[in-house]
Image (cartoon, helix red, strand yellow):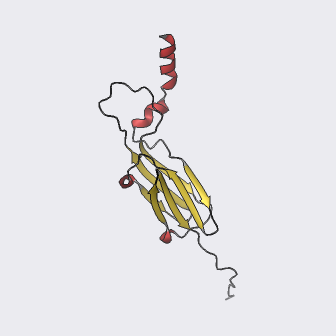
Amino acid sequence: MERRIGRMIRNMSLNRMGHFSDSGGWEPAVDVLESEDTLYIYMDASGVEVEELQITAEKNRLTISGRREFPGRNLSCIHQLEIDYGSFCRRINLPVAVNVERSTSRCRNGFLIIELPKLQSRGKFNIPLS
């Protein structure tokens, strides 16, 4: 009995109990990948309904917010709780300038995939003197 209570106390923490709040205290995992002409953002969005996602892009920053609902109803006991639930907001500083008007997004296999075309430099440009 003592071991069981000890394990229960170790598994309980303010962070674990915060899953049910709307404080936005968790952040989904994100990968940022770059090709020659595109920046790719992959976010773990498993369990998040597409209608719950909001994506805002600026020239060098991306903000993804949403909510993952807790699936349990009328529970009498939680034996293990490792998945984060509730609202989230993830801000990502982009390593390069992107063309936000040409950006696209889709969900596939539990991932939110955002494609951000890079702003293309026109090469050398002469600046006229006035």
Give whichever of 37, 24 is nearer the camera: 37
The foreground one among 81 and 119 is 81
Across and down, in percent, residue 4 comes to 48, 15
Q: From the viewer's side, name the closer residue of 65 and 31.
A: 31
| Residue 55 x/y as whole percent | 45, 59
Write the residue at 44% across / 34% down.
Answer: 18
Question: Where residue 59 sits in the image (x, y, percent)?
Answer: 54, 66
What is the residue that sits farthest to the front in this orientation?
109
The residue at the far top in this view is: 1
73 vs 62, left or right, is left
Q: Is residue 100 above or below residue 46?
A: below
Q: Quadrant of residue 118?
A: bottom right
Q: Is residue 125 depicted above or below 45 in this figure?
A: below
Task: From the viewer's perspective, tell me whether residue 94 is left or right of residue 100.
Answer: right
* Left or right: where 125 falls relative to 43: right
Image vertical order of residue 51 relative to residue 24, above or below: below
